[in-house]
Image (cartoon, rainbow, N blue to C red):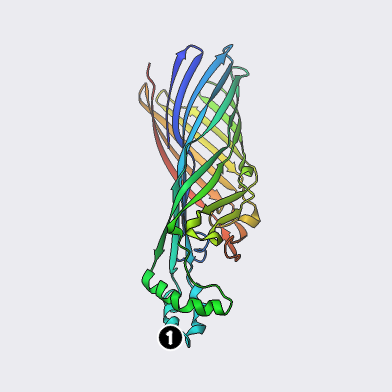
């Protein structure tokens, strides 16, 4: 999503404001899949309100700066008792009649899951940029957007049981026996009795671009984007004391690495009403192989883009665009921060993204 407005204050001084969501993702793996203990579904939305002012020097150099007012929300669902986890209870059938039927009931479905969700506080970052017209044909631009550390101060957890009364009744029967054998019980931590605190850094971005205007109709542009994902070294989710679930606090090592995105595109002004565009980009993954997991199944990606602008009126533009993205499949293993179990898999991704936009120029 992108909404913006810009206007001139003086001949060499301009201002603008935009609302967009530069970061965001959502993945739903389903409730019963093999990695449900790591993630069932996850959603992250980050929005930015960006007021910016720019000034043009000597008709060839423009400098701009502004703020980034960031806010958003976060949710994560995990199976607390994944499918099949209760199979080991069957050895207690002689002590607790009916426990085998109980375990079989949850052989293929999680007995209990938790959904963590919360809104972030408002955080402020900054952006600066410089654009230089080297000649009438060549223009170079550099921009920087700062890192912003998002914070969820009071997130909430919701517990979801298939049958809460049945589960708790069986836990009261089997837990004393399991504990006498030196094993953990099957009690589900009361995550919904308190709140949690979580932090997530949004990376800095340094963009360097060059545009070549071949003639009045052809424009070619290239860009390299340096993304400071190295700031994301750990995901921490800490519950308040009243939850009494210190063992469920998440302290997951991420150790992301800085990455780059390469872009190349061209625009052709076919007529006074039609502009056509074609482009491609290569997006490096910031996730190291040993930390690849279904929560962020990241991989290197190719993107092919095409689009056009139609102007039914001189001041009105309608943009149509389409992007095809394909991932370079990769294998990876991940050690669960809670259970210590190793989860391995092969990941791939494909995306088809249509887009439409409207713009109007006031004169």
Judged from this view, the residue extending furthest toward the front is: 242
Classify mark 1: helix, strand or loop. loop
Q: Residue furthest bottom?
A: 94
Q: Position of residue 311 (x, y in %)?
A: 37, 26
Query: Which residue lies at the image location 54% right of the left edge and 43% below the top edge?
Result: 303
Which residue in the structure is indicated by mark 1? 97
Residue 333 position, x and y percent, is 62, 61
Where on the picture, by quarter, is residue 182?
A: bottom right
> Mark 1 packing: few (<14 Cα in 10 Å), some, or many (20+)?
few
Image coordinates of residue 54 in percent, x first then y, are 52, 19
Q: Quadrant of the C terminus?
A: top left
Q: Nearer the viewer, residue 250 or 311?
A: 250
Position of the N terminus by quadrant: top left
Q: Is residue 101 visible?
A: yes
The number of numbered badges drawn on the structure is: 1
Q: Vertical placement of 2 versus 182: above or below?
A: above
Is 113 above or below relative to 299? below
Give the camera-side residue of 250 and 134: 250
Residue 347, quarter of picture: bottom right
Residue 27, relative to residue 316: is it above or below? below
Q: Residue at x 45, y 62 (%)?
A: 190
Residue toward you, 307 or 175: 175
Residue 198 lies, in percent from the top left, at 52, 48
Q: Is residue 163 visible?
A: no
């Amino acid at each position: 999503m992108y909404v913006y407005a810009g206007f001139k204050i003086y001949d060499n001084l301009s201002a603008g404001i935009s609302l967009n969501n530069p970061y965001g993702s959502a993945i739903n793996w389903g409730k019963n899949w093999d990695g449900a203990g790591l993630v069932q579904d996850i959603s992250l939305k980050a929005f930015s309100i960006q007021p910016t002012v720019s000034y043009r020097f000597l008709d060839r150099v423009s400098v701009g700066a502004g703020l980034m007012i960031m806010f958003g929300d976060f949710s994560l669902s995990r199976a607390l008792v994944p499918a099949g986890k209760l199979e080991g209870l069957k050895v207690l059938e002689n002590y607790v009649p009916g426990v085998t039927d109980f375990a079989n009931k949850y052989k293929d479905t999680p007995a209990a899951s938790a959904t963590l969700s919360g809104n972030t506080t408002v955080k402020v970052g900054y952006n600066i940029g410089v654009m230089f017209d080297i000649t009438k044909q060549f223009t170079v631009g550099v921009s920087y957007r700062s890192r912003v550390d998002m914070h969820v101060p009071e997130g909430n957890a919701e517990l979801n049981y298939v049958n809460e009364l049945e589960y708790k009744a069986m836990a009261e029967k089997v837990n004393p026996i399991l504990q006498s054998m030196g094993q953990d019980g099957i009690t589900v931590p009361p995550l919904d009795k308190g709140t949690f605190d979580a932090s997530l850094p949004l990376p800095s971005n340094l963009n360097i671009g060059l545009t070549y205007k071949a003639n009045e109709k052809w424009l070619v542009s290239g860009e390299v984007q340096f993304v400071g994902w190295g700031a994301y070294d750990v995901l921490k989710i800490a519950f308040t004391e009243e939850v009494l679930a210190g063992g469920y606090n998440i302290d997951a090592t991420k150790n992301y690495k800085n990455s780059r995105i390469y872009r190349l595109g061209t625009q052709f002004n076919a007529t006074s009403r039609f502009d056509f565009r074609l482009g491609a980009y290569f997006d490096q993954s910031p996730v190291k192989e040993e930390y690849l997991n279904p929560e962020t199944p990241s991989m290197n990606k190719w993107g092919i883009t095409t689009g056009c602008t139609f102007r039914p009126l001189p001041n009105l533009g309608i943009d149509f665009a389409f992007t095809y993205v394909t991932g370079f499949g990769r294998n990876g293993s991940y050690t669960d921060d809670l259970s210590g179990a190793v989860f391995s898999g092969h990941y791939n991704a494909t995306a088809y993204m249509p887009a439409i936009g409207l713009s109007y120029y006031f004169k």
